[in-house]
Amino acid sequence: MTLTVEKLDVYMQFKGDLDGRTRSAASASRQALSDDEWYLIDELLMQLGNVHAGHASAGFIARLEARLQSVTADEATRDTLRALARRSV
């Protein structure tokens, strides 16, 4: 499972509302971003929000950065996730 900026665009299109997407989106949207990927984005945003708020240890930050490297396609995707997390805090 690899997150991309395009997948984050789908997530943002529905403002993080998975139920809203399920009720109203075309099947192409569901194919572009799986429910598991949606949950991963939710989880990463929560964790990045904790980091941004100063509620994370150095070890947690290092593990999160390693995870971000493994589940995202590129730096642009990681930057987009970080920006989304800052908006959520």
Image (cartoon, helix red, strand yellow):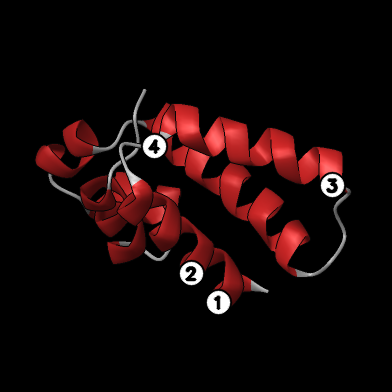
Side of 48 relative to 34 (left or right): right
* Mark 1 or 2: the one toward you: 2
The three-letter code of the residue at mark 4 reads Thr
Question: At numbered mark 2, what does the secondary structure look like: helix, strand or loop?
Answer: helix
Percent x, y of residue 35: 40, 32
Q: Quadrant of residue 29?
A: top left
Tag of residue 72? 4
| Residue named by callout 3 | 58
The one nearer the camera, 23 or 9, is: 9
Q: Give me the C-alpha separation between circle 1 and circle 2.
A: 6 Å
Tell me what residue is drawn at x 85 percent, y 53 percent. Answer: 56
Please say if 25 is above or below 51. above
Mark 3 residue crowding within 10 angstroms, few (<14) / some (14–19) / many (20+): few
Q: Are marks 4 and 3 in contact (CB under 8 Å)?
A: no
Q: What residue type is labelled 3?
A: Ala
Residue occupied by mark 2: 83
Which quadrant is the N terminus positioned in?
A: top left
| N-term mark: 4 or 1 | 4
Residue beneath disc 1: 87
| Element under disc 4 | loop
Question: Can the viewer see residue 9?
Answer: yes
